[in-house]
């Protein structure tokens, strides 16, 4: 079906168009219209899936099933929001004279290129192409992390690239080992590496080779997802990347990497039963949530705080998938959906606050931001309430579903630890943001630029309205997609 | 005959790994990586001839052109431009490093016995060498300070993965292999650009200086 190809081609063309110079207005219009069309095509592809079942292309090297369709919609949405915010971000920086034409070209080319790679991840059925797509996401995002070219951004970009490439080396080895575990029953040629072929050949796979492959692949893609202990690049990269790119990394990249983990988990479950990879996912997930606890409690930087929150949430998702069953899987996918809608508000408002104060360090920003930048501060508070999982917002419910599934599964102890960690994380995150936003302003005054209602702020407000709406009223097609994804993810087991 | 060539080349790759550990001059380390890639190409040819798998000739050509010539040439240009020729004292001295790598080789060989093909002679060696090189690459990565050496360590890991792939599955489907090779080339280019930017900023490519971000 050509719809799928168009969905991939449009962001690619937008990226190519973004790489050439030109007047600012035309470039901005091109970028935003490209992203809008991409999102519309993602929706159309998902709609075509809902109407007519899985869509395949090129010997099923690209394939849209329930899980892929959900990912397409989520990542397309994240790409659109980040792009619009990014345009506003550049305008703001331009006012400060800190944007060179080179930076503009880089930004306009890399954001759609990144989105293209993220969408390719979501629709790759071929594990080889999946790997290539994940590597492309890394390469597209490195220069977004290094965007400001400061010493700290280069350091963050270097760590990001080295750890990411090493993780991908592991993932490649994992893929090779999985391929070898099938002992030739996958045949040769392109279709041999298809996930669907793996699933068909799974029951007869060589257990030792398969287990080794699964471990390498989970560690490899886990690095990209930012699961502890491979999470160390995340705080640096999120702090240094412009907030729009940060949001795309925290949502799109996270979804994409979790998608890879899931595909590997499913192969492993079909081959040697769910216990093996579930145990690994539970362990990595729990470790991630626990690692986030001390760093959120003692955090000194707003954007790093968001990074640790993202490590926490990817951990919660991994735990949900690890607990498994229909409830655990559904909970984790629901969590991913709500997280996708909520996280951008946090990044956009935090980014605005950081830009107004020329720093994202708590100390430099000074407490009491609500008096200086009321709109962003209120949005940041709202984002905090949503992403820490307070009722009545969506993440509260998805966390409850995962916890309930956990307590009725054999993993009661792990679930109890998760519950305790969630309570501490809630308090820690709320304390940090509350202190920053509502605390007494420092006596000697703070240097800051006043808040203006520009494109960035409007994007953040729109993102907040969408997140709150989806939190209370989930559109039926979206719910259908989550259900379809739950089916793919073996909810019936 | 092909089997002997195969084992000889695999052993040669392991030797280049060890030499890299004991090497401080960056140019020599890059040439060692180039030699390692040529040996990988020879292994692909040997398997192609021995097992009659013509598509491995493409893999071999690709390996030699990209990893044996293009990437070393690019890295040498990077080193030449920035004018830093030697690795400073690594975190661990050379004799100790070599001893550890010996231990890693034993571990690699031990793990390789678990594979179904592991019992048979030739593939056992290839996988054993591959796993050992993987571990040596990781070791290089954590003990070296210069950006270029870290890139070489990463590339060694990548060569090791390809060697294991050759030994265990006689190669991946061609299109995928093309894509992967292209990605690796792109990654090296990006790394090179990043090194240049780091050197411009820090006037050094000592990555142990990249330590401002904590917590």
Image (cartoon, coloured by chain):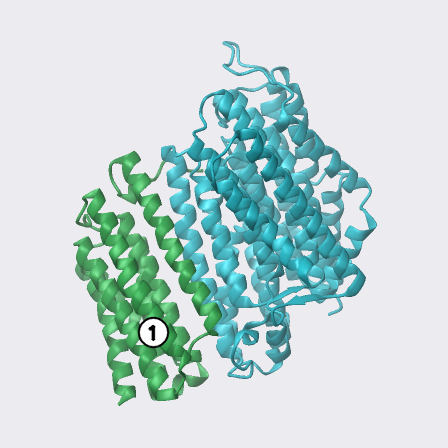
Quadrant in which the N terminus of chain A is drawn: bottom right
- Quick one: A294 or A385, which is closer to the camera? A385
Relative to the observer, which residue lies in front, A427 or A267? A267
Query: Left or right of A447: which side holds A439?
Result: right
Where is residue B14 shown, x and y percent of the image?
A: 26, 71
Percent of width and height locating residue A363: 48, 23
Depth order, front residue of A321/B77: B77
Identify the hue of chain B: green
Depth check: A229 or A353 in front?
A353
Residue A61 visible (yes or no)? yes
Is the residue A117 above or below the residue A34 in the image?
below
Residue at (66, 53) in percent of width and height:
A72
Please report the residue visible at 56 percent of the width from the left and 36 percent of the height from the top.
A244
Where is the C terminus of chain A found, in terms of image quarters?
Answer: bottom right
Give me the residue at 41% from left, 49% from top.
A161
Q: Is residue B7 above or below residue A454?
A: below
Q: Colour of chain A?
A: cyan
Q: Which residue carries the number 1 mark? A: B60
């Amino acid at each position: 079906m050509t719809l799928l190809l168009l969905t991939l081609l449009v962001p690619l063309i937008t990226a190519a168009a973004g790489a050439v110079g030109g007047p600012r207005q035309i470039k901005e219009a091109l970028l935003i219209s490209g992203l809008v069309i991409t999102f519309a095509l993602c929706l159309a592809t998902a709609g075509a899936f809902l109407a007519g079942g899985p869509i395949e292309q090129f010997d099923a090297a690209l394939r849209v099933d329930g899980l892929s369709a959900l990912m397409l919609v989520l990542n397309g949405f994240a790409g659109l929001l980040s792009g619009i915010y990014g345009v506003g971000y550049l305008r703001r920086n331009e006012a400060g004279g800190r944007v060179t034409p080179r930076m503009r070209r880089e930004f306009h080319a890399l954001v759609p290129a990144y989105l293209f790679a993220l969408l390719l991840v979501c629709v790759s059925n071929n594990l080889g192409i999946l790997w290539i797509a994940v590597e492309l996401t890394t390469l597209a995002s490195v220069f977004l992390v290094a965007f400001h070219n400061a010493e700290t951004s280069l350091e963050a970009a270097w760590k990001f690239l080295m750890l990411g490439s090493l993780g991908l080396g592991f993932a490649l080895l994992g893929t090779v080992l999985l391929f070898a575990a099938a002992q030739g029953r996958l045949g040769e040629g392109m279709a041999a590496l298809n996930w669907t072929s793996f699933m068909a050949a799974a029951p007869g796979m060589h257990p030792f080779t398969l287990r080794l492959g699964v471990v390498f692949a989970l560690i490899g893609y886990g690095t990209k997802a930012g699961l502890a202990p491979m999470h160390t690049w995340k705080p640096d990269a999120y702090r240094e990347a412009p907030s729009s790119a940060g949001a795309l990394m925290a949502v799109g990249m996270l979804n994409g990497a979790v998608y890879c983990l899931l595909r590997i988990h499913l192969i492993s479950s079909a081959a040697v039963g769910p216990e093996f990879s579930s145990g690994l996912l539970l362990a990595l997930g729990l470790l991630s949530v626990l690692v986030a606890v001390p760093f959120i409690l003692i955090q000194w930087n707003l954007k790093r705080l968001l990074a640790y929150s993202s490590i926490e949430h990817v951990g919660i998702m991994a735990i949900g998938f690890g607990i498994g069953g229909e409830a655990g899987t559904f909970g984790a996918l629901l969590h991913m959906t709500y997280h996708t809608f909520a996280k951008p508000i946090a990044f956009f408002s935090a980014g605005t606050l950081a830009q107004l104060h020329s720093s994202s360090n708590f100390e430099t920003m000074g407490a009491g931001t609500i008096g200086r930048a009321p709109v962003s501060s209120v949005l940041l508070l709202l984002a905090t309430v949503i992403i820490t999982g307070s009722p009545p917002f969506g993440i509260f419910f998805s966390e409850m579903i995962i916890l309930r599934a956990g307590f009725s599964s054999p993993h009661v102890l792990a679930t109890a630890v998760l519950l305790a960690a969630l309570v501490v994380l809630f308090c820690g995150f709320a304390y940090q943001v509350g202190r920053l936003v509502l605390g007494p302003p420092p006596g000697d005054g703070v240097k800051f630029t006043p808040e203006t209602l520009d494109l960035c702020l409007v994007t953040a407000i729109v993102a907040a309205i969408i997140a709150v709406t989806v939190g209370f009223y989930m559109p039926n097609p979206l719910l259908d997609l989550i259900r379809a994804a739950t089916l793919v993810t073996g909810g019936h087991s | 005959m092909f089997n002997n060539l195969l084992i000889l080349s695999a052993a040669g790759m392991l030797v280049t790994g060890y030499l890299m550990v004991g090497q401080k001059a960056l140019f020599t380390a890059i040439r060692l990586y180039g030699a390692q890639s040529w040996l990988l190409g020879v292994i692909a040819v040997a398997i192609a001839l021995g097992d009659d798998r013509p598509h491995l000739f493409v893999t071999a050509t690709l390996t030699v052109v990209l990893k044996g010539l293009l990437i070393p040439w690019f890295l040498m240009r990077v080193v030449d431009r920035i004018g830093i020729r030697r690795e400073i004292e690594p975190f661990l001295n050379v004799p100790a490093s070599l001893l550890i790598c010996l231990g890693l080789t034993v571990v690699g060989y031990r793990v390789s016995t678990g594979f179904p093909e592991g019992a048979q002679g030739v593939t056992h060696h290839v996988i054993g060498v591959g796993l050992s090189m993987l571990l040596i690459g990781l070791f290089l990565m954590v003990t070296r300070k210069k950006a270029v050496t870290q890139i070489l360590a990463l590339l060694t890991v990548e060569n090791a993965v390809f060697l294991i792939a050759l030994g265990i599955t006689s190669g991946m489907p061609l299109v995928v292999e093309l894509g992967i090779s292209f990605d690796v080339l792109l990654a090296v280019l990006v790394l090179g650009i990043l090194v240049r930017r780091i050197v411009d900023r820090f006037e050094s490519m000592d990555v142990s200086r990249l330590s401002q971000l904590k917590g």
